[in-house]
Image: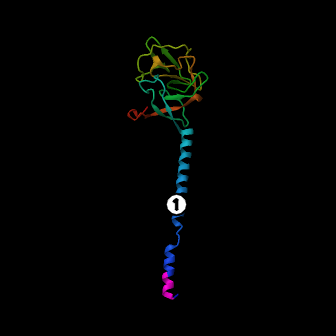
Amino acid sequence: MNQENKKIYEEINESYKIDDRPTDRFSTSCFEWLESIAQAVIVVVISLSFIFRIVNISGWSMLNTLRDGDKVVVLKWNYVPHNGDVVVITKGQFLDEPLVKRVIATENQSFSIDFKSGKVMVDGKTLDETYIREPMWLQGDNNIPDIIPPGHSFVMGDNRNHSMDSRFKNVGIIPNENIVGKAAVILFPFDRFKII
């Protein structure tokens, strides 16, 4: 084989060599994708465990603020109950399922309800409860303390006459450790999307 033919032969062989670089790029790309997916799953799991949770609203006790079937984002991270917050309460001693209610009074606050007028007093001031559906006439069967005990919160639904809440013995005053967090945003249905 002369020199010229040998050169042509080498060029042809060179053009038919298998280039394994695309395969390496595909493998690297797949690995990077899997790594990204794993990281995203870890972030979601940690977020759902410690930072927030999505809760489905069941029932009508929080009308007009929340409706049956609403999905809300609940902020959990280092949550401490505050007056006026809409909260999710875990199953407790007498509860079969989580509750969504509004915090009316927190630990060490003086508290009273005038059931004739439907007015609620916290620390000697009448609350301006623009969020309630109608004036309250439903009294309940629980003995309401004058001062909320340490580590507890008194909760009621916004639809006061159709709400099982701290006015009733089977719910009672809620230990703060049973409060999951604050309902912050109505996520779904989209036409009701808003900050609570």
Q: Looking at this view, name the residue that lies furthest to the bottom.
A: 2
- Residue 181: in magenta span: no
Q: Position of residue 68 (x, y in %)?
A: 45, 26
3 vs 170, nearest the viewer: 3
Q: Quadrant of residue 27?
A: bottom right
* Residue at position x 50%, y 81% in the image: 9
Residue type beneath disc 1: Phe
Q: Position of residue 104 (x, y in %)?
A: 49, 23
Q: Dot 1: few (<14), some (14–19), or many (≥20) neighbours within 10 Å? A: few
In this rendering, is residue 149 above or below 14? above
* Residue at position x 38%, y 34% in the image: 191
Q: Looking at this view, name the residue that lies furthest to the top.
A: 116
**Which image quarter is the C terminus in?**
top left
176 vs 5, nearest the viewer: 5
Q: Is residue 96 visible?
A: yes
According to the image, what is the colour scheme of the structure? rainbow
Q: Which residues are magenta?
A: 2-8
In the rendered structure, the answer to whether residue 116 lies left or right of residue 141 reads: left
* Residue at position x 56%, y 42% in the image: 45
99 vs 127, nearest the viewer: 99
* Residue at position x 52%, y 14% in the image: 140
Q: Position of residue 92 (x, y in %)?
A: 59, 25
Q: Which residue is mark 1?
A: 26
- Residue 7: in magenta span: yes
In this rendering, is residue 152 above or below 144? below
Tally the marks. Answer: 1
Q: Is residue 124 visible?
A: no
Chief secondary structure of the magenta span? Answer: helix
Q: Position of residue 136 (x, y in %)?
A: 44, 16
Q: Looking at this view, name the residue that lies furthest to the right.
A: 93
